[in-house]
């Protein structure tokens, strides 16, 4: 599922699928889901809050809340509020934890590892949606 913040700027699949360019729209969505979104969200929703937590000397739950809540807010879809909120909170916690664990080595390693975990998650979801698993 592409977050509404990013999906807002992308053309709808119907807009892209003109004169037999369905492959282009699919590859565009794959590129966004597997490359652009994980890197962008890691920089904005994990790296920036981690740096702020360091700057403000936050620790404990405040440090985690600074990462979890923005991630959850970006991933909330009003039509499916509860599932998207659970997904956002769980994803924010998991990716935040991944970032904080890897941050002990360096922020560069933390960004790369977190973006890779996020991309893997999106890849699994994309495969489920492409092959209609679970519907």
Image: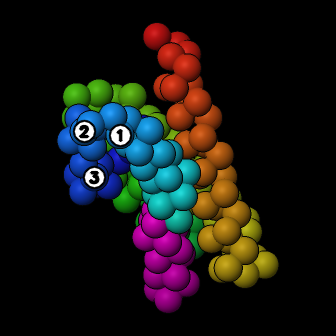
- Residue drawn 46% across and 10% down? 135
- Residue drawn 50% across and 16% down? 132
Instruction: Specify which label sits upstream in the sequence, 3 or 1.
Output: 3
- Residue drawn 37% across and 59% down? 70
Q: Is residue 81 above or below residue 46?
A: above
Residue 10 appears at what percent x and percent y?
28, 52
Q: Which residue was labeled with disc 3?
A: 10
Which disc number belongs to residue 21? 1
Q: Are marks 1 and 2 in contact (CB under 8 Å)?
A: yes
Bounds of the magenta span? Answer: 40-56
Name the one closer to the observer, 89 or 44. 44
Is residue 43 highlighted in magenta?
Answer: yes
- Residue drawn 56% across and 25% down? 128
Residue 107 appears at what percent x and percent y?
66, 80
Label 3: few (<14), some (14–19) or many (≥20) C-alpha neighbours in 10 Å: some
| Left or right: 44 as drawn, with respect to 34 | left
Which disc number belongs to residue 42? none
How far is disc 3 from disc 1 in space, using C-alphas? Answer: 16 Å
Q: Is residue 70 above or below residue 7?
A: below
Name the one closer to the observer, 94 or 77. 77
Q: Is residue 67 visible?
A: no
- Residue at the far right: name it: 105
Q: Which residue was labeled with disc 2?
A: 18
- Give the quarter of the image for residue 23: top left
How far is disc 1 from disc 2 in space, using C-alphas? Answer: 6 Å
């Amino acid at each position: 599922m592409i977050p509404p913040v990013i999906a807002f700027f992308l053309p709808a699949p119907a807009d892209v699928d003109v004169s037999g360019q369905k492959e282009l729209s699919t590859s565009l969505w794959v590129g966004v889901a597997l490359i652009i979104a994980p890197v962008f969200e890691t920089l904005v929703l994990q790296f920036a809050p981690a740096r702020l937590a360091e700057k403000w000397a936050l620790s404990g739950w405040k440090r985690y809340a600074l990462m979890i809540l923005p991630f959850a807010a970006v991933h909330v879809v009003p039509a499916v509020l509860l599932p998207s909120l659970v997904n956002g909170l769980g994803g924010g916690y998991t990716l935040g934890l991944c970032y904080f664990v890897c941050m002990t080595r360096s922020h560069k390693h933390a960004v790369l590892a977190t973006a890779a975990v996020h991309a893997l998650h999106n890849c699994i979801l994309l495969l489920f949606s492409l092959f209609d698993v679970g519907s």
